[in-house]
Amino acid sequence: MTDLHQHRTKNIIIYIATLIFGFAAFAAPNIFFGVTKINGGLQGINLAIIGVLQLVLILIVLQIALRLHGKEFKWLGWHFGHWPKFAAIGICVGLAWTIVQHFWLIPVTGGVERADMQGILDMLQGGIWGLLGFLVLGIVGGGIAEEFFNRGYVIRGFQDLFANKKMGLWLGALFSILFFAAGHLPSNGVEWMDILIPTVLYTALFIWSKSLVPSIFAHAVYNGSLIVLTYYSYVA
């Protein structure tokens, strides 16, 4: 086996292992609180703990993977070049999708009776602590951790498997979209649309900017604003 083939085989093994351990890093805190029901299970302050644990665990997984690849976090797009511009664009994209979904898409597809909305409302129980806990989960575990993993590593790691980097980038973007959407376990066409549209937007921002900043801001702002709007529309 040539050195090139050995290098590619090594990267494939690292990539697959990182996907598995990364998925486990997101799932494990949810499963733990969901099964044990400690302090009420998946609600209140537990949601904040889950979000923080997800970020910590995913950063550990990525740190190990990057060392094995011989890369740094900058390789994932974690840098601050043009960050005010990228942040502003991300915020606008996140708010735009929130407006479309909350004020149009959700109402015309069943509103509060939707299964996913019922799940959100269950996690928002507990008053202001439920809201704050869900915000931490949505922003830290969702907006930050998911972007590092699903945009930064999934795309860059996939791209690195190809000699043709341009083709690897676009195939990696497609895989990232499908992997991220499937990981949210949509159960019907509406839920697939709900997750695919923002996922395409986050991926487009990442590829366009070569930075995680706009996709993190878009994802975090969308999650946070939708949680707040849902709470004050249906719970408070």
Image (cartoon, rainbow, N blue to C red):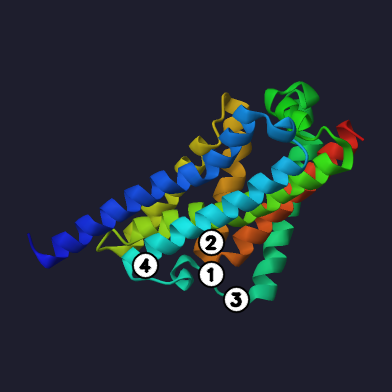
Give the numbered dot on residue 78.
1
The answer to which quarter of the image holds residue 192 is top right
Image quadrant occupied by the C terminus? top right
Q: Look at the numbered disc 2 and give the secondary structure of its residue.
A: helix
Give the numbered dot on residue 67.
4
Q: Amino acid at mark 2?
A: Phe
Q: Residues within 10 Å of mark 4 (few under 14, many from 20)?
A: few
User: Which residue does the numbered mark 2 point to in the structure image?
Assistant: 206
Q: Is residue 68 visible?
A: yes
Q: Amino acid at mark 3?
A: Phe
135 shown above or below 63: above
175 shown above or below 217: above
First reached walking from the N terminus: tag 4 or tag 1:
4
First reached walking from the N terminus: tag 3 or tag 4:
4
Q: Position of residue 60 (x, y in %)?
A: 48, 59
User: Which residue does the numbered mark 3 point to in the structure image?
Assistant: 80
Work out how far the residue at label 2 is from the one at label 3, CA to CA, in angstroms: 13 Å
